[in-house]
Image: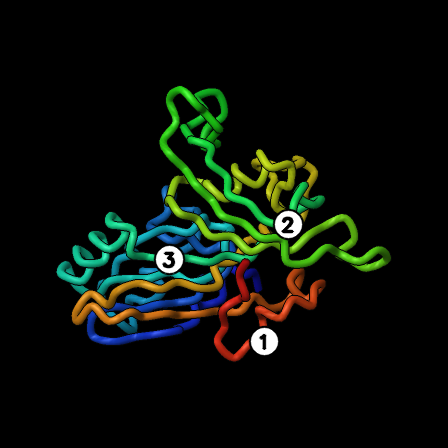
Amino acid sequence: MTAACDPPRIVHCDEAIVVVEKPSGMPSVPARTPLDPPCVAERLAAFFGTVEAVHRLDRDTSGLLVLARSAEARAALGRAFEHGLVAKRYVAVVRGAPPIDAGEIHQPLAPDPDRPPRQRVDVVHGRRAVTRWWQRERGLAGTPAEGCSLLELEPLTGRSHQLRVHLAWLGCPLLGDRLYGPREERGRLALHAAEISFPHPIDGRELRCTAPALGSPWDWFQFACFTTASGRAPTG
């Protein structure tokens, strides 16, 4: 059974929203062709009725996705995203290692007209895109992680393929990224949305959900963010 056939795991549910952990291989939104697997909303319809994703994860990215159960919730969450009130954290396994331990990437992005659906750094026509990153662990020699690094990522904007393009620009393409890394890459895209926090659409209280990255390639590393009681990785 492929990951796309596995159901999304329910992380939080109430009268306004559903938060799930999306498996790699499942579309966030309705697919473009009948040959594509059902999207998250379609997989949840039998249990929750009509729901709508309020943001997107790339099909091959796993992790937390928020869906609205009403038009009012959808509008409120849309405003939260628009006003920068939503915070997201990702973990990633990359090829190589960044040149320093932490940093912030400011590189505007635009569609690549010659190679759709790729995006590219474009300082003339691109839209503002900002990513914070921290190197958490380097792979040990003689282990499956040799030549790779574990990074924590915080996107401050939400451009299409932002993390994938910024990491490739940094010289550390994501493991399994055949679009922005070596075409001979094999295996799943090593990008996981591990945490999201946002104001609840009904009462405005902050809601924080976490989903630890488990299994390969995450278990190549020992970083404590996967086992801390709070679920939040240390920063700085």
Mark 2 or 3: in front is: 2
Q: Which mark is residue 227?
A: 1
Q: Which residue is mark 3?
A: 87
**Disc 1 residue type (three-letter):** Thr
Disc 1 and disc 2: Cα gap in Å? 22 Å
Name the residue at 46% across, 28% down: 116
Q: Which residue is mark 2?
A: 101
**Where, quadrant-wise, is the C terminus in this rendering?**
bottom right
Looking at marks 1 and 2 on the same chain, the residue that comes earlier in the sequence is marked by: 2
Mark 2 surroundings within 10 Å by alpha-carbon count, few (fewer than 14), some (14 through 19), many (20 or more) = few
**Disc 2 residue type (three-letter):** Asp
Mark 3 surroundings within 10 Å by alpha-carbon count, few (fewer than 14), some (14 through 19), many (20 or more) = some
Name the residue at 44% across, 66% down: 21
Query: Is residue 41 rendered to the left or right of residue 235?
Result: left
Across and down, in percent, residue 144 comes to: 78, 57
Disc 3 and disc 1: Cα gap in Å? 20 Å
Q: Residue furthest front?
A: 236
Could you tell me if residue 125 is visible in this image? Answer: yes
Query: Is residue 107 rendered to the left or right of residue 139?
Result: left
Q: Which mark is residue 38?
A: none
Name the residue at 48% across, 63% down: 194
**Disc 3 residue type (three-letter):** Ala
Question: What secondary structure is found at the residue carrying circle 1?
Answer: loop
